[in-house]
Image: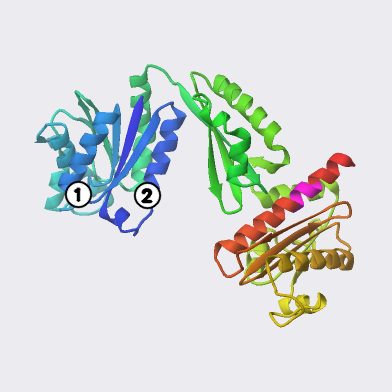
Amino acid sequence: MNAEIISIGTELLLGEIVDTNSTYIARELRDIGVNIFYITTVGDNLARITEAVRASLERADVVITTGGVGPTVDDMTRQAVADATDRTLEFRPELLEEIAERFRQFGSRMSENNRVQAYIPEGAIPVYNRLGTAPCYIVEAKNGTVISLPGVPREMKDIMIATVLPYLRERMGGLGIIKARILRSAGIGESSIDARIGDLETWSNPTVGLAAHTGQTDIRITARADTESEADSLIAKAESIIRERLGDFVYGTDRERLEDALVSALRDQGWTLAASYNGPSATFFKDRIGGGDQGGRDLIVVDIADHDLADLLDRLGQSDGDGERPVTADTYRDLSRAEARRLREASGADVALAIVSHIDGTGITASTPYKERSRSYQFGGSDTDAPVWAVTWAMSMAWQLVRQAGHHS
């Protein structure tokens, strides 16, 4: 079964609210084996909503709309669905009574404009909304099915669980599921991952796809099967190949965070970490790793220093432009290397991270007693993404070095 989602509301197009409904519906449909190929957002305009529903019915077996089922002038979903399926709106007295009863339960008086909510497309199956005043409906048309849900997330989710998912399962003649697993990677770019596993991305079941984030890349494995165990088996096959090809670049799965993987590796090895940074990186590092004795727990971060860039330049016999040689991105790599070594010796930590960032470059070094890794970038520290990228790469470098030390110990 293929489905499409249409989110309705001009406020979505204006960026006033974020469309979380489509994300929720897509995940629920995925878990029962329904494919989603398109998600559409349309404003409060009758002609455009009608056209969106018609277009979706040409491509999908089921169209799910959210929003536009309230009592106000800009709630046009009822009429649009009726027009798109060549039907009229018909008055349902029982729905009006449900609406009136809901207002009585709320201790409020029903306005006359709420009467319009008792009109639904001719022949539609009413869907009870136990949390709100807007009745919903299912239209089984000759060219597909349209299910209209409220835009209020709480109401929409309740109706999805209570009515829509059971209805779709019955239509499909079985449970059937789609399962997904995300492998989290860091320290390697999206293009490099693609070069290693590009052949897997052509598979039809399971499917393998990439999603790049700032400093990290997710590898999503999605499998479709009749049973959960069959889906798990398909996912395990792909995961085994990916891990073999990417090695220690994969630090976790699903919702695991890089900082947690790093802290876990440090504890497994019995190592401590010291960190040094300047500028915006300080805030991101503190937020993601923490500092001090971590509330009396194991001492993971033994020293966090927000170093002074001018002082670092002086140590290498340079200045901010009038020194012995120009300050470049490579300069910041050298600075980070020197600072990491100094910090590891001064603090006694097993691992030292140093991030040196300025307007024209960023240097990152992870240093251990056995091995050291350094990187330099042309971007500076003023860009919003730059410190996030730098901290992520620093943590991934440290995580890999700690893991490698554990493998050889």
Q: Nearer the viewer, mark 1 or mark 2?
A: 2
Residue lying furthest bottom: 322
Does the segment drawn in magenta span residue 400?
Answer: yes
Q: Is residue 135 above or below residue 342?
A: above
Does the segment drawn in magenta span residue 220?
Answer: no
Mark toward the start of the polypeptide (1 vs 2): 2
Residue 127 position in % (x across, y down):
26, 33
Q: Nearer the viewer, residue 117 or 23?
A: 23
Q: Please name the predominant secondary structure of the magenta segment in the image.
A: helix
Task: Name the residue tied to disc 2.
Answer: 19
- The stretch in magenta equals 398-402
The residue at the point 38 percent across, 43 percent down is 22
Quadrant of the image containing the C terminus? top right
Q: Is residue 103 above or below residue 178?
A: below
Residue lying furthest front: 325
Q: Looking at numbered disc 1 in the image, what kind of residue is underneath it?
A: Asp
Task: Name the residue tied to disc 1.
Answer: 75
Residue 37 position in % (x across, y down):
37, 34
Q: Secondary structure at mark 1?
A: loop
**Residue 377 visible in the displayed image:** yes
**Residue 97 visible in the displayed image:** no
